[in-house]
Image (tube, rainbow, N blue to C red):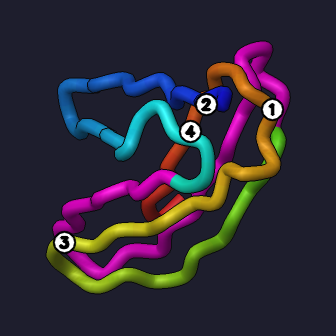
Amino acid sequence: MNTTPIQEVETPDNQLSVFPNPSTSEVTIPMELSELSAISLVVYDISGKQLEQQQLGYFPYGNASQVINIEDYLPGSYLLEVRVNG
């Protein structure tokens, strides 16, 4: 069984974690939002090629989470961008 890790990068303004990491089927992305926010996700391969973009819609203030299915991804490392109101 191969697993697919997603690189976690922390910035001073926010942090993004996914679990479980690595995974073979799906990952959960927890979010803490300071206001009603439009959320979209972009997945890139390690070379920077965009593989997928999902418009998730609006999430309310507070804690939220989103599950992403990664069963169709080949084993390897991927980058995840979460866009808030952008």
The mark closer to the camera, 4 or 1, is: 1
- Image quadrant in which the N terminus is located: top right
Question: Is the residue marked by circle 1 packed among few (<14), some (14-19), or many (20+) residues within 10 Å?
Answer: few
Disc on res. 63? 3
The answer to the question of whether label 3 and label 1 lie on touching residues, with beta carbons closer than 8 A, is: no
Residue at 63% from the left image edge and 21% from the top image edge: 77
Give the residue number, with chain letter if any, for mark 1.
Answer: 74
Q: Which residues are magenta?
A: 27-50
| Residue 85 x %, y % | 47, 65
Give the residue number, with chain letter if any, for mark 2.
Answer: 4
Please state which amino acid type lies under the numbered disc 3.
Asn
Residue at 20% from the left image edge and 80% from the top image edge: 61
Q: First in sequence: mark 4 or mark 3?
A: 3
Question: Is the residue marked by circle 2 packed among few (<14), some (14-19), or many (20+) residues within 10 Å?
Answer: many
- Mark 4 vs mark 1, CA separation in Å: 15 Å
Disc on res. 57? none
Q: First in sequence: mark 2 or mark 3?
A: 2
| Residue 9 x %, y % | 37, 23
> Between residues 64 and 6, which one lies in front from this camera angle?
6
| Residue 17 x %, y % | 31, 40
The answer to the question of whether label 1 and label 2 lie on touching residues, with beta carbons closer than 8 A, is: yes
- Mark 2 vs mark 3, CA separation in Å: 26 Å
Q: First in sequence: mark 4 or mark 2?
A: 2
